Image (tube, rainbow, N blue to C red):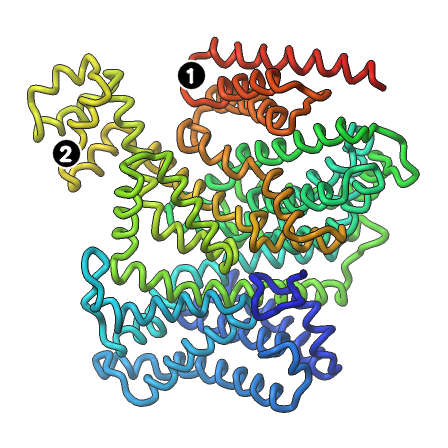
């Protein structure tokens, strides 16, 4: 099963497949190419020079990329070049153009009437919402349009029928359409703004990198680095997919582009086919966790948390590296078990030659990082980096980017953006409903109640919700919905856990202690010396909610509170990735299975096992300062986390350097727990490390004897 075989049911669409399979007319290809170039140029102008109203820009953004989707993707795959289909798609394009013109020329008239709809307002706003539903259906299947319809009807219809905490008295249809279409809260709100600015510029940057030959350079560099290692082809997949995913922003595209090279390499070396596909799927999923693009998640997270984009990607780097190391441990263990030894293969790549031929590809990435660190906006940094890609390409003899190549890169970037743009604009309708009705706070309270105030069970509930949503939503949309609904609950629980730790240890600042005077003045003396955890929980529960925010700021500090908010969102973002590799709907694993010719569901199960870091690392984020900790703390956490995850892999697989017995697997599990369990004494972590190293060294000696 591939993303292109069922366009109305899948979560991601390969537009190139649709263009070649369904829309083969030469005139249409030229039209699509022209529109793509126009959209790319227009968005570059908007993001660098223009000062236009955000509502106009968002409407243009939706209309332009919506028109691309309408022309590239038919309403149904069997329609192909049907005249009726072409008429219908042409009508959609004209309606999108009319929608933009109406906002530009008639928005002021609406406010002059006191925001009272006339007939034209009703028609245009209703058609805009319907167009959003249809375009999302074409690109992402039925689930998201269904979710949007449920959300919109909740506001105007069935919300008033509910009892209890989810009861909503309702809004008029006129108010709903106004907030959905004319205001900057619905379709054309903050999510749309992120789409036409940060996301587009970085996707365009990625398209220029690929066109300049950077994709081949990444694969060749990975092969040169890992080819001589035990299980080298597997590490090529991990390195290559991680590097490609750091700029591509799509796990399925990452799987298809790198998997056609890495999966045959792994099979040729001796890895089982299903394992090879699982490695590629797990590694490609990790590409969305790796800065700078992170599948658009970094930009949305920066908007939600009001923490700078540079800070987001800097704190995301170490957790992402831990994830790729966890996949790499599975590769090494399987290589040992399958006797995949390091050899000089016929297609080995020389590193010095790779760097000699492709060193210039590093220049644009260096420019990007330098500009971001210097404090320039991400859009400006991406724009300058695109120019750096073009300039650096002239240092190569194979991929010099002349006018034709530049136009091709711009067109490809626009096509790559089209499905994402339509999705993000449409999902703004759901976000608007959540903020308008307050259902986000209600959902957070519900999660907290179900979990009994337990942070661990809250994370489990969020993971389950993300898996269910991920069956129908792309991971970015899943993160947006879950982040809006459950981030407040996670934030409060993580902040309260740190606050309780300070109360029980007697480290609470005096300014924060003074707030407890409102609750129990007699507790001040006890707080100074430290109090039992149960007493601290009881005391904290008595603090009025209106004062808890002030208490957290006084106790933890504004910087720590900001990092806790980032942690909550980062956990949700990580957990939203699990649908890529978790059956029954796991398109990344399905795409890898199609390349490896293995059963999709079994491949999905293998990928799910290899992607265990998606669950371990978020727990470390929640219970340790992995996000925002000082350098010494991060080094200690990372060091023991690496060995702890390696020990866990050995315990799961029953194999480390050699086959391990059941008692030894138990020892590895204990060692893993001692190194991964949060807030243990250093000597306990060191004992766990010694246990792991003892098993590792013994197994390594046994393995060498067996060769």
The circle drawn on residue 680 is: 1
The circle drawn on residue 445 is: none
Picture coordinates of residue 546 (x, y %)? 16, 42
Task: From the viewer's side, name the closer residue of 174 and 698.
Answer: 698
Give the residue at the far front of this rendering. 662
The residue drawn where x is 70% and y is 11% is 698
Q: What is the quadrant of the N terminus in the image?
A: bottom right
The residue drawn where x is 34% and y is 66% is 151
The residue drawn where x is 48% and y is 73% is 60
Where disc 1 sits, the SS reads loop
Q: Is 198 above or below relative to 246?
A: below
Q: Residues within 10 Å of mark 1 (few under 14, many from 20)?
A: few
User: Is 159 placed left or right of 609 in the picture?
Assistant: left
Picture coordinates of residue 641 (x, y %)? 54, 24
Residue 352 in sight in this render: yes
Task: From the viewer's side, name the closer residue of 683 and 90.
Answer: 683
State the image quarter where residue 359 is shown. Answer: top right
Q: Residues within 10 Å of mark 2 (few under 14, many from 20)?
A: some
Picture coordinates of residue 248 (x, y %)? 63, 52
Q: Is 665 above or below relative to 481?
A: above
- Mark 2 vs 1, N-terminal side: 2
Q: CA distance from mark 2 to mark 1?
A: 30 Å
State the image quarter where residue 200 is shown. Answer: bottom right
Q: Is 12 above or below relative to 583?
A: below
User: Is 254 placed left or right of 315 in the picture?
Assistant: right
The residue pinned by badge 2 equals: 543
Where disc 2 sits, the SS reads loop
Q: What is the quadrant of the C terminus in the image?
A: top right
State the image quarter where residue 3 is shown. Answer: bottom right
Picture coordinates of residue 223 (x, y %)? 79, 38
């Amino acid at each position: 099963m591939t993303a292109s075989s069922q366009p109305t049911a899948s979560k991601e669409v390969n537009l190139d497949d649709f263009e070649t399979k369904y829309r083969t007319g030469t005139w249409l290809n030229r039209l699509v190419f022209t529109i793509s170039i126009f959209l790319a140029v227009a968005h570059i102008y908007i993001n660098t020079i223009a000062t236009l109203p955000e509502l106009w820009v968002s409407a243009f953004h939706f209309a332009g990329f919506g028109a691309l989707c309408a022309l590239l993707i038919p309403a149904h795959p069997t329609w192909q070049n049907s005249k009726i289909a072409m008429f219908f798609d042409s009508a959609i394009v004209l309606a999108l153009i009319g929608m933009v013109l109406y906002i530009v020329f008639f928005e002021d008239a609406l406010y002059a009437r006191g925001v009272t709809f006339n007939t034209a307002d009703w028609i245009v706003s209703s058609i805009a919402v319907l167009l959003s539903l249809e375009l999302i259906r074409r690109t992402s299947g039925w689930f998201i349009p269904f979710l949007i319809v449920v959300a919109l009807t909740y506001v105007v219809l069935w919300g008033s029928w509910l009892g209890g905490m989810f009861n909503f008295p309702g809004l008029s249809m006129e108010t709903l359409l106004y907030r959905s279409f004319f205001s900057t809260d619905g379709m054309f709100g903050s999510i749309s703004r992120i789409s036409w600015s940060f996301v587009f510029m970085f996707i365009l940057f990625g398209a220029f990198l690929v066109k300049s030959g950077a994709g081949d350079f990444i694969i060749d560099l990975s092969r040169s680095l890992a080819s001589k290692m035990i299980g080298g082809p597997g590490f090529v997949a991990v390195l290559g997919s991680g590097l490609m995913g750091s700029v591509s922003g799509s796990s399925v595209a990452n799987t298809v582009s790198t998997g056609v090279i890495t999966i045959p390499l792994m099979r040729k070396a001796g890895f089982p086919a299903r394992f090879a596909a699982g490695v590629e799927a797990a590694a490609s999923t990790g590409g969305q966790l790796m800065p700078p693009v992170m599948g658009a998640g970094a930009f949305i997270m920066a908007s939600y948390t009001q923490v700078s984009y540079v800070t987001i990607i800097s704190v995301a780097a170490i957790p992402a590296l831990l994830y790729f190391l966890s996949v790499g441990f599975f590769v090494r263990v399987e290589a040992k078990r399958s006797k995949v030894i390091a050899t000089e293969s016929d297609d080995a790549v020389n590193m010095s030659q790779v760097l000699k031929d492709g060193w210039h590809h590093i220049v644009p990435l260096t420019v990007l990082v330098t500009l971001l660190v210097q404090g320039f906006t991400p859009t400006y940094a991406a724009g300058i980096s695109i120019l750096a890609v073009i300039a650096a390409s002239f240092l190569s003899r194979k991929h010099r980017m002349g006018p034709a190549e530049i136009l091709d890169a711009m067109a490809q970037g626009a096509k790559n953006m089209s499905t994402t743009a339509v999705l993000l604009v449409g999902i703004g309708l759901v976000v608007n409903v959540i903020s308008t009705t307050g259902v986000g706070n209600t959902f957070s309270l519900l999660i907290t109640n179900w979990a009994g105030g337990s942070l661990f069970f809250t994370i489990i509930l969020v993971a389950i919700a993300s898996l269910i949503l991920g069956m129908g939503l792309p991971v970015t949309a899943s993160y947006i919905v879950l982040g809006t609904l459950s981030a407040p609950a996670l934030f409060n629980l993580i902040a309260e856990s740190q606050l309780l730790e300070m109360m029980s240890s007697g480290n609470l600042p005096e300014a924060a202690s003074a707030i407890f005077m409102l609750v129990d003045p007699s507790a001040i003396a006890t707080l100074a010396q430290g109090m039992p955890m149960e007493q601290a929980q009881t005391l904290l529960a008595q603090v009025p909610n209106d004062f808890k925010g002030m208490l957290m700021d006084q106790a933890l500090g504004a910087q720590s509170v900001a990092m806790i908010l980032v942690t909550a969102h980062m956990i949700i973002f990580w957990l939203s990735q699990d649908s890529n590799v978790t059956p029954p709907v796991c398109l990344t694993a399905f795409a890898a299975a199609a390349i490896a010719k293995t059963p999709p569901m079994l491949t999905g199960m293998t990928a799910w096992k290899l992607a265990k870091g998606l669950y371990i690392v978020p727990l470390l984020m929640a219970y340790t300062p992995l996000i925002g900790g000082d350098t010494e703390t991060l080094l200690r956490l990372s060091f023991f986390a690496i060995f702890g995850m390696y020990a866990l892999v050995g315990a799961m697989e029953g194999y480390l350097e050699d086959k391990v017995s059941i008692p030894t697997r138990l020892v590895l599990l204990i060692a893993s727990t001692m190194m991964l369990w949060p807030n243990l004494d250093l000597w306990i972590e060191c004992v766990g490390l010694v246990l792991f190293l003892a098993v590792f060294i013994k197994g390594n000696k046994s393995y060498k004897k067996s060769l």
